[in-house]
Each structure stands twice: as C-alpha cells, then as structure tokens.
Amino acid sequence: MRWRRLRTLLVREVRATLRDPFTMASLIAVPVMALLAFSYVLATDVEHLALGVYDASASPASRRLVAELGASDAFDPRPFATRGALEEALVAGDVGVGLVIPPDFERDLLDRAPGAPPPELQLLLDGAETVVAGNAETFLRAIVARTGGDLVSGQAWGPSGHAAPTGLRTVTRVLFNPRLEGTPFMVAGTFGFVLSFLTTLITAVSIVSERLTGTFDQLQLTPATSAEILLGKLLPLGAVFAFDVIVMMAVAGLLFGVWPKGNVLFFLGVSSYYVVTSLSLGLIFSATSTTAAEAVQKTVLFSVPLVQLSGFAFPLRSMPAVVQWFAEALPATHYIRICRSIYMRGEGPLSMGGDLLLILVFGVALVWLAARTLERRA
Amino acid sequence: MSEPIIVVRGLTRKFGEFVAVEDLTLAVPPGTIFAFLGANGSGKSTTIRMLIGLLRPSAGEIRVDGIDVIAHPRRVRDRIGYMGQRVSLYQGLSLRENVEFYAGLYGLEGAALERRWGAVRERFALADAEGERPENLPAGLRQRAGLALSTLHAPRLLFLDEPTAGVDVQSRELFWELIQEEADSGVTVFVTTHFLEEADYCDWVSFIDAGRLVADATPEELRARHSDGYRIRVSGGISEEGRTRLARAGLEARRDGEGWALRTARLDSAALAALGDALGPEAAGRVRVEQPAMNEIFRRVIADTAAARNGPAA
C-alpha cells in the first residue's frame, strides 16, 4: 500500500462527498433523526397518555386516586359521564386507555369486613394498540396499587375507623384483541410498511431510469399526455401491488391465523387506492432526481420517518405531541390506522371517516403533484 | 422561396449564470437537411431540446410548422419525429414490440400499422432484427431502428440529435443515405452532430460555438467564405489559351513541379466547364481536386469570429 495513492483516493472521495449537498444532508440528518427518534420519540415510557375515567363512585377516595394518576405525568385523566361514552372514546382513539371506578369504591376500600375482597377497578385497553396497551397497563397497575395502599394506611377516609387489610384490585378488559397478541398488530401494520416503502422504491427508479436510457424523452414527444403517461405507470404497478395485498392477506391468515375482522373488499379497495398514492410519491421522487441512486436515496430517507413515526412499529400515543402532529402528515400513518381498524376491530368506513378522508386527500394531492411534476419536466 | 418551416428568433437558454444558448436566430426551409454543428458542449442539444418543446427557453421565439412551440409544446408533437443521442428503444421488448408501442401512441394500429411498418421495415432493412431485443443488436443497426421508429408516424420534420455518435464509418454512411431519402420525400431534417465532415450531406450548415451562432450558410458558401478554396492539381501541361480561359473563370494556374496547381473559391458549373475547355477530353484523368475539410473551415470560422470580437490584432 502506498500512502500517496491512498491520499489521492481519499482526497477525491472527500471532495466528492462534500460537494454533494444531498449526500451531506443525508449523512448528517439521518443519524440525528435516528438518535432523536429512538432515544426520545420512540421511548416506550408512558407519558401524558390520555386516560379516560368513568368515576361512578365520585367519592373523596376515587377523586384522590384520579388526582394521583394525573400527578404521575404518565396519564392525563379525562372524565366521562358514562361507561358507554368512555368506551366510545376509546374506540375512536380519543383516549389511549380507560379506567372504570365502581360506585362502591370508597366503601369497599375503607370500610369492609376482614377477608372481604378489595374493591375492583376496571382497566379498558384497546387491543389494536398492543404496545400502548401493554405499557399503559403496567404503569397504571403500579400507580393504582401504590395509591390504594396509601389510602388504606392513611385511614383518614374510613368512616368506620378500622383498617382495611389490603389495597386495590385491577381487572383488565381488552377490546378487540383480548390476549394482546402482537402478531395481528404487526400484520396489520406490515401492509402499511410494504405498500408505502416498496411501492415508492419501485417507482422511484422507473422514470429516472427511462430518462437515462432516453425513452422518457421519446415518450414525452409522442401525443401521450402527462396524465396518460402517469396512469400508464401507476395502474399496472397498482394492480401488481393490489395482488400483493391479497397474497399477504392469505399468508397472514393461513400461517398466523390473522384474518381481517372487517370487510375484505373494503380493505382491498382502500389498499388499492393507497397503493396509487404511494406510487405517485415514488414517481415524484423519480421525476425530480437526476440519477437512479439519488431517487433511491430519497426513498430511503423518506422511509426512516415512515418506519419510526407512522405507528407501524412504535405507538404514536407514546410520542410527544409535536411528533404526533408530524406523523399525521404522513399518509402511511392514516393507512396503518385504517388497516388496524379493519383488521383488528372489524370497523367499517363510518367509524374511520377522518383517516379515510385524509387518505383520499393525500391521494388526490400526490397524483396531481406527480402529473404536474411530469408536465413540468416536459 | 417557400416559408421556413422552423423559425427561431433571439433564442436564449440560461442555466443559472451559465448561458448555454445565446440570442440564436435561425430559419430552416422545408424539405432540407439542416446541420447544426459544433463542438461538444457548444449548445446543440440544448437548442434541439428547446425546438421540440422538451426544454423551455429563457427568452426568444420558436415556430415549428407554424406552431408556437413555447406556448403550445404539445401541438407540435404529432408533426415531428425525434431521435436522441441514446436510441430510445425499450430494452426487454423486441423491436416489433417497440414498434407496436410507439405506433399505438400515435394511433397507428391494425392494417394501417402493418402497411406503414412493412414499408419502413423494408426501407431500413430491419426484417431480420424485428424479433430481436435492442440490447442484442449491433450499434449501427440499433441506430437505424431508432431512426425507423422516429419516422413511423410519417412526421413532417425530423429532429436528430447526434444520431451517428458511437457508430462505425460504414454504418454512418448508410445512416446518412437514409436521412437523405427522408429529405427527398419532403421531410425537413434538423440534425446536430460534432462530426463536422457530415456537413457535406446537408443543404444548410450552422456552426454554433459557446452557445452563439458563428456561421450560417450552405456548405459551398462556407468553403468560399472561410477557406482558401478548392485546390486542383493538374498533371501535365496547360496551354496558354487554356490558362486564359481558366483565369476568366476565376481559376488562377501556377506551376507546381511537372504540373499545375489551381485554386478556386467555388467548384461550380462555370469552373468545371472552364476546366473541361482548358484540359480537353482527357481532363478527368489529369485532375485531382482537394476539397477544404469542414474541420478546417470550422477552425477558421472560430478564429475569424474571435478576431472580429476582439478587433484587429495590433
């Protein structure tokens, strides 16, 4: 090995890297984003999770318990007037976890006979949000047990004056995925990941490759309109990926026993529409890149937040509010939410109107933008 | 003279601070082969991409077949054929499948396609290549197939951007024969090349240098203006009367060893007639004509332009 030759090679490589702004930005932005995401945004701690509370007791003891939960920083309690309202909020995603305090809570806690069971609190969890549910349950049980112990040992609340032998019991009721199995959660999310990442990657190289071989210029000089060229690209790939969805559904069903609880045709329809949305994004990357490598770099850069922030692997509810707002700007976030709603809760279009509307808007906007990008490149 | 089919006025294209094409003005008569020559990076491809509507100019006007290309780039597309430096055939598809693809985009199908493709296939000698994929074809044949595809929809104008780049000499000659056949059938051909000697296949030549038009004339006119003219060597003697006739036609004869050397700016019919008269019936066997090379003319044009720009040397 000769130092001079090595130095020459090193100098060229450093110059080339420093003069490529896209590579430089990637080299700096990706590690910083990964560090922030994994250490802060994607931490599994429960912080300020919306906790729906139906307090049927409305007693000093139950209020103390709710106050303790609120003071923990783990939960932000929100009162609900009825148990039904609480369950609706949980299904709608307005709260991440629910707590039902029974009417006789205080009496059963502080004034019960020796040997009688302690009062029972009910935790309501959304099994479709497996990770959030698991983490929240652990945190909630710990706080409830500690607060219950404090209440009993303090005696201040007991009208009869004798000590209660134990604290509180919690029973958990999990909606939609009673055993909190991770497989349905991941299966439903994988549709979002595959249909976002792979579609974008495949199309990202298509136009830039055609431009490099000269066929795209030729194509643009034919009477074919930009819309026709766009659809000519999107529809065949869309059909392939729609078929992929069917294959994935069959494999998940046959191998893991995970079938969609909702309407299969509705799921297929939404997925096919989402495929077109993702393909359009890939076409935009492709049409705005000068080389295939640049198009792939853009796709990979895009897929970092896709994996981390869309709720595919890490629960959105555990993330800071600012990050959650950003996640809402990703079409994948809404598609993954729709997937889980159909797959795990068996929901129909009416209960996921907001996400459907946003997917629709994202789709129209991205297809329009892709057509405009192709036209502008013409 | 008929109206120009391509009219360009004040065409300019900037990329940031870099001026790729500056204040270009051209007029191309219909049915001619118009050569747009220049070195690599001189602005040829940028110009052709603006003419066909693939690139928007920074300033100027372009009319192709009466259509304002800047305002309506799409309207001109079914009237033009284009072949770029890279032959635009889809790899993985056979030549026949490529033909069906492009023909379909022009609405050419069924019997009409078979008739048209049959004629084009025969003229471009592509029958044996029809089932082959482009990546398996030799470069010359691939270029020919590319040209055939660009003429499939019978365009009124053909824009060819460096069509002979990377092709061997024999294939280039065949390629130019095909281009001339297109022009003979009434198609206007606008061709860029950096092979300056190819200018002699063309009716009109424009030289571009650093984005500026530096010459614009027929090949003969360029030779007359920017060279020492044709050099004619005559073996054996020329009578005094013959020398007088030659001088009257503008051919001045000087002794050159055993023979004579003549120079003329234009080798036109008058000069050829004077040679015939002066040398008699055996003239053809005694004469060797050296044509000024287009490379030399280009160098002279560039030098003359630079001199004119900088003023007379001290």
Image (cartoon, coloured by chain):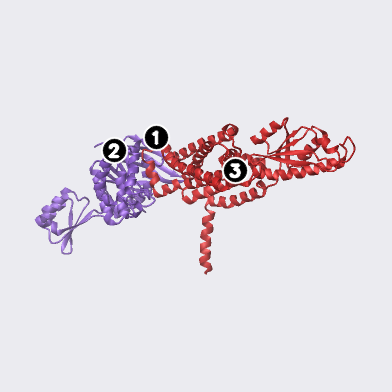
Label 3 Cα crowd, 10 Å radius (few <14 / some 14-19 / many 20+): many
Q: Is residue B206 visible?
A: no
Instruction: Name the side, left or right, on which A1 lies relative to B90.
Output: right
Per the image, the residue denoted by label 2 is B4
Instruction: Name the side, left or right, on which A357 lies relative to A162.
Output: left
Label 2 Cα crowd, 10 Å radius (few <14 / some 14-19 / many 20+): some
Label 1 Cα crowd, 10 Å radius (few <14 / some 14-19 / many 20+): few
Kindly give the residue lying farthest to the front in the view shown: A115
Q: Is residue A111 above or below residue A255?
A: above
Per the image, the residue denoted by label 3 is A310
**Position in image of residue A70 (x %, y %):** 76, 39
Q: Secondary structure at mark 2?
A: loop
Q: CA distance from mark 2 to mark 3?
A: 59 Å
Residues at marks 2 and 3, common chain? no
Q: Which chain is purple?
A: B
Per the image, the residue denoted by label 1 is B71
The amino acid sitting under disc 1 is: Ala
Q: Nearer the viewer, residue A375 or B313?
A: A375
Q: Secondary structure at mark 3?
A: loop
The amino acid sitting under disc 2 is: Pro
Q: Quadrant of residue A220?
A: top left
Q: Nearer the viewer, mark 3 or mark 1?
A: 3
Q: Nearer the viewer, residue A164 or A228?
A: A164
Q: CA distance from mark 2 to mark 1?
A: 19 Å
The residue shown at (75%, 44%) is A141
